[in-house]
Amino acid sequence: MNVFTLERGTVPLLISLPHDGTQLPPAFAQRLSEPARVLPDTDWQVSRLYAFARDLGASMLIPHYSRYVVDLNRPPDDAALYPGQNSTGLCPLQRFDGGPIYRDGQQPDGSEIAERRQTFWQPYHDALVDELERLRSAHGRVLLWEAHSIRGQCPFLFDGPLPDFNIGTADGRSCNAQRQARIAACLAAQSTYSWVANGRFKGGYITRHYGRPDAGVDAVQLELAQRNYMDEASFAWSPERAARLQASIRDLLVAALV
Ligand SMILES: [Zn+2]
């Protein structure tokens, strides 16, 4: 089964978009609760938002399947990412609004979770490891950019409206300090968007696990508030807002890559 697309680029930048997928396996949709069937918690159209990065020479890793099947940005043992806070797991049971993903009795059991991990999670991570190693050995260092987006208001997950740009580097551990400083300086130099580094979102499993600055791999997660490129209720793309946002993300990637 083909569960992801990897496009190999020419510069030391791999953009991973683990929550972009919207496909479901056969007969999966009928197990879902009505509100879950429209996949509200997808990082909607985030691969479209980052399409410009191909022109920068970035590699792109894009999954095909929904995070409701398996969450690629969770550890394989499903340990909590943010202990003590509401979060969602490897094969999540709750939506971001706190409601159930599955109809009663349709939740996956342990063997189904193991099968999904094998079928959907493992191939994505194998490709991620291979591409990081290819770029790192070719260029000496590589930047892994974890591209995400989320509704700006999710009371179940966090208080208040989320800043526009949320940079996560595992509290500074997943990325070289100079590179982080260039990213922060780029954000500080603009006044269009609000931003925070290592606030509510500090980077998920991929950022924390693969970010090894001492071994030549810098990992940065950018969690974007979706209001800046789409309508959060209908998931509709907003061309003008998206174009403005893309220019700012481009500035950030260029500053990070120097
Ligand atoms: Zn995401």
Image (cartoon, rainbow, N blue to C red):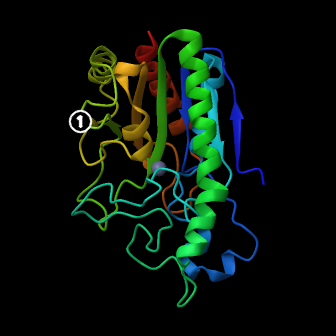
Among all residues in the image, which is located at the extreme bottom?
104
Q: Residue at x 29, y 38 (%)?
A: 170
Vertical arrangement, residue 54 with respect to residue 34, above or below: above
Vertical arrangement, residue 16 with respect to residue 190, above or below: below
Q: Amino acid at mark 1?
A: Asp
Which residue is nearer to you in this view: 120 or 237?
A: 120
State the residue position of label 1.
171
Q: Position of residue 231 (x, y in %)?
A: 51, 54
Q: Position of residue 50 (x, y in %)?
A: 58, 33
Left or right: where 104 falls relative to 98: right
The C terminus lies in which quarter of the figure?
top left
Which residue is nearer to you in this view: 205 or 64?
A: 205
Left or right: where 59 falls relative to 2: left
Which residue is nearer to you in this view: 249 or 133?
A: 133
Quarter residue 97 falls in: bottom left
Quarter residue 33 falls in: bottom right
Quarter residue 1 falls in: bottom right
Mark count? 1
Q: Is residue 170 visible?
A: yes
Q: Residue at x 47, y 23 (%)?
A: 143
Vertical arrangement, residue 53 with respect to residue 221, above or below: above
Q: Position of residue 160 (x, y in %)?
A: 24, 57
Vertical arrangement, residue 47 with respect to residue 189, above or below: below
Left or right: where 203 falls relative to 248: left
Mark 1, other Cα within 10 Å: few <14 / some 14–19 / many ≥20: some
Q: Position of residue 142 (x, y in %)?
A: 49, 19
Q: Is residue 222 visible?
A: no
